[in-house]
Structures are given as structure tokens and as C-alpha cells.
Amino acid sequence: MSAASVELPVPSGAPPASSTPDLAPASAPPAEATDVHTRILRCMLAVDDCYAYWQHADEAVPLADRAHVAFERRWFGTKSEARVRTIMTDMVERFDAYPEALALFRQLGTVPSNLRPFLCHVHTQLADPIYRRFTGELLPTRREQGLTTIDRDTVARWVDGLQAGRWGASTCIKFASNLLATALDVGLVGGRRDPRKLPPIPVPDVILGYVLYLLRGVRIDGTLTDNPYLRSLGVMKATFRSFAAHIPGIRFDELGGVIDLTWLEPSLTAWGLRYLGANA
């Protein structure tokens, strides 16, 4: 077991995010993606595709060949080769960039269906800065302000405000539609028509454990107790202590306002085999 203060950026000693490629060399710590892109316009949460990728991804197949192999072997059913290439671009960025997590999913084989959307959500956040800000900043802020709904026009204006003038109005609206649809698949918003509701988020405790053990080894902008990944799931810095006692694989202590977490498992893999496997 090891104890660590969590009020520091994690992990230390990594190169700046701007100099860390999405697919980092094996010697470098994984990092959340920081380059803005438009992939969510073509591939949203894609839970079933993610699950298929976890079960079939083979590191022995070079990345350049993997989309063709996926198409030939029907990893994603009867989808066209062009569609498979689009999906594979996201799968690589979401999961290959975090190799211990992908290896864990492959080793588990079966992942409970109620957990899959949350796991896909966290990895979509890691790979997509706009989705990360939408779910980890905009939606939590509205909840904190006491607002109970959100609509597509509000999200479209928010997208345009991220980098004013970069995208046309139709692209901003498409962004808004896909961001909302992706969040709907996780349960972060409710309803397919405006105004969309902002319901309570029934996140399983085991997902919070996964987030903490995953982020312990990933360079992020934030700390282990205050970051967009936890905020998107309804866990704010001020409320972390109320969730901590229920998170599996973690022992929480607080003394003089300093939070310490004791890690009861040595790695994400060990934690996942014990707790995600127990939910299978």
C-alpha cells in the first residue's frame, strides 16, 4: 500500500502536455489530449464499438494495418471499410494511448454493460478536449448554478466561444448535437429534444475508483480530487470527501485540510482485476 497527497498536479516529472504526442512513446507517461479536433462530429460515444475493440485489439498488428484487419475480420460487424477507419482513428486515440487500461479491458474479457458507457466516457474525455470541457466544465457549472436544463443553441454558442470564428454556424450546431447525444448515452443529460434535462448522475462507486487509478498514471490539467473527469460525474472538489469513503481500493484521510489517499492496490491492472472483474 502507498499513500500520496493528492493536492498536486499528477503525475510530476512529465514533459509539458503541448510537447507530448497523443500516442506517447512507451518511456513517457500517458497524457490527456490537448489538440482540438472534430472527431466527435464523426464518432460519438460508440459503446458497442469500443467494447468490440477491447475484445479484438491486437498489439501485434501494426497501427497502420489495424483498420484493414478490423474490417477483414469484422470486428465491428458489417460496417464499411471507410466507417471502420473512422472508428479506428478514435479507438486508437482513446485506448492505445493508455496501454495499461486497454490491456486491462482485454484481460477482463467481459465488462458489465452498466459500466461500459462510463468507461467510454472517461476515455472520450481523455482523447477529446472539447468533450472534456463540455462535460467537465459547462455541464457541472450549470448544475452548480441551479440550472436544470440545457439546449442545443446554448451549447452551439459555447462551442463557438471556445475559438470564436473557427467554425461556421452549421458546424457549431453539429458539435452541439453530437456533444449532447454523447452525454445522453452516458446519462449526463436526459431527453433528445430541447430543453434537455440535467438529471442526477447515478455513477457507480467502482467507476470513481477506475478514474482515480487511471489518472494516477496520466498527465492531466488538474489534481486527483479536482479535475474534469470527476466533475463530469458529479464529484466536485468540495464534495470529494463525501464520495471517497465508498470508492473501492482507496482509503481516504484528511488532516488539517490536506487530503491523502492510500492506494490499496499496486496498479490499475491489479485494481481492475479485483473490482471491475468482481462486477462482471
Image (spheres, rainbow, N blue to C red):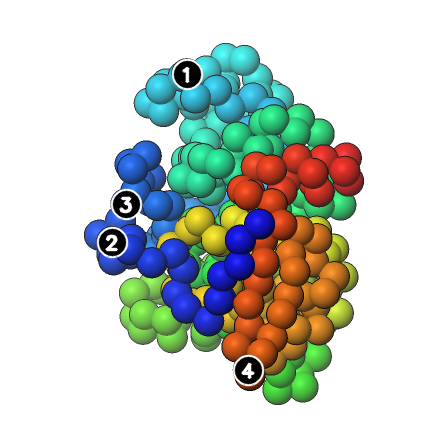
Is the residue 80 above or below the residue 47 in the image?
Answer: above
Element under disc 3: loop
If you read the primary sequence from the N terminus, does the residue marked by circle 1 or circle 4 appear first? 1
Is the residue 170 above or below the residue 259 in the image?
Answer: above
* Mark whose residue sits in front, 2 or 4: 4
Q: CA distance from mark 4 to mark 3?
A: 36 Å
Q: Quadrant of residue 256?
A: bottom right
Which amino acid, mark 2? Answer: Pro
Q: Which residue is mark 4?
A: 257
* Mark whose residue sits in front, 1 or 4: 4
Q: Which residue is mark 3?
A: 21
> What's the mark number on residue 15?
2
If you read the primary sequence from the N terminus, does the residue marked by circle 3 or circle 1 appear first? 3
If you read the primary sequence from the N terminus, does the residue marked by circle 4 or circle 3 appear first? 3
Which residue is located at x 44 percent, y 40 percent?
98
Q: Nearer the viewer, residue 249 or 134?
A: 249
Which residue is located at x 48 percent, y 66 percent?
5
Is the residue 166 above or below the residue 257 in the image?
Answer: above
Element under disc 1: loop
Which amino acid, mark 4? Answer: Gly
| 229 relative position to 243: left or right | left
If you read the primary sequence from the N terminus, does the residue marked by circle 2 or circle 3 appear first? 2
**How packed is label 4: few (under 14 Cα within 10 Å), some, or many (20 or more)?**
few
Q: CA distance from mark 1 to mark 2?
A: 28 Å
